[in-house]
Image: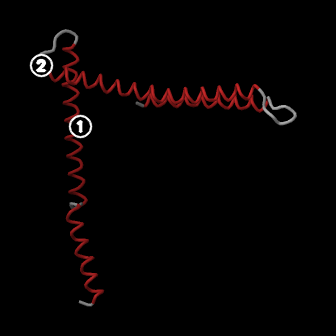
């Protein structure tokens, strides 16, 4: 995703440079009366073309991301259907999926353990307990203000 964003940023930067160049050319084409002639019209058309290219580039990147999602879903479904029965060049890929999934579970377990440890050490309370205590304090203050 980062690579796509870098490419998009680079492309948009190039398009902006081109648009500035075209605008500069149009300014140079101003005659003594202050009117812009044919170069301005050409420059405006180029600027529109560059803007269209930028929009199309965004659309293209969106479509490429959607295609990646579809390929990912196809692969996931294929993996789920053939799990444990992969043959040929799929066998090592399936094994890699299993190893990676196990690594993910291990990391998630460690994260959960560390979070529990931090919560225990810091004495963090459940948010529901804190909200209930806050409501009790507000109610007591309201009653004191009313003179009850």
Residue 84 numbered tag: 2
Q: Which badge, 1 or 2, comes first in the chain's sequence?
A: 2
- Residue at 69% in and 27% down: 43
Q: How is the image coloured?
A: secondary structure
Q: Nearer the viewer, residue 74 or 92?
A: 74
* 29 left or right of 76 in image: right
Residue 14 seen: no
Q: Quadrant of residue 12?
A: top right
Query: Residue beneath label 1, please?
Result: 107
For this view, does 19 lie left or right of residue 98?
A: right
Mark 1: give few (<14), some (14-19) or many (20+) Cα within 10 Å.
few
Indicate the quadrant containing the C terminus: top left, top right, bottom left or bottom right.
bottom left
Given the current orientation, which residue lies at the most extreme top position? 88
Q: Is residue 102 above or below residue 139?
A: above
Q: Secondary structure at mark 2?
A: loop
Q: Nearer the viewer, residue 25 or 80?
A: 25
Tell me residue 59's x, y (percent): 45, 28
The relative height of residue 51 versus residue 89 in the rendered view (above or below) is below
How far from the left and from the top, in percent, is residue 91?
A: 18, 14
**Disc 2 packing (10 Å; few <14; some 14–19; many ≥20):** few
Query: Residue 144: image x %, image y %?
Result: 27, 86
Instruction: Point out the frontmost of discs 1 and 2.
Output: 2
- Residue placed at 24% from the left, 81% from the top? 140
Residue furthest to the bottom in view is: 147
Q: CA distance from mark 1 to mark 2?
A: 24 Å
Question: In this orientation, which residue lies closer to the viewer: 47 or 35?
Answer: 35
The residue lying furthest to the right in this view is 32
Q: Residue at x 28, y 24 (%)?
A: 72
**Position of residue 125 in the picture relative to residue 11 (left or right):** left
Could you tell me if residue 41 is visible in this image? yes
């Amino acid at each position: 995703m980062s690579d796509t964003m870098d490419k998009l940023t680079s492309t948009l930067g190039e398009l902006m440079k081109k648009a500035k160049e075209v605008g500069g050319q149009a300014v140079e084409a101003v005659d003594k009366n202050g009117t812009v002639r044919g170069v301005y019209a050409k420059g405006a058309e180029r600027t529109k073309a560059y803007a269209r290219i930028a929009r199309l580039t965004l659309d293209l990147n969106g479509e490429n991301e959607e295609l990646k999602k579809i390929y990912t879903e196809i692969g996931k479904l294929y993996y789920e259907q053939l799990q444990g029965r992969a043959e040929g060049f799929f066998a090592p890929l399936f094994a890699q999926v299993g190893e990676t999934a196990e690594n993910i579970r291990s990391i998630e377990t460690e994260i959960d353990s560390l979070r529990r440890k931090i919560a225990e050490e810091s004495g963090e309370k459940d948010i529901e307990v804190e909200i209930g205590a806050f409501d009790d304090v507000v109610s007591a203050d309201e009653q004191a203000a009313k003179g009850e």
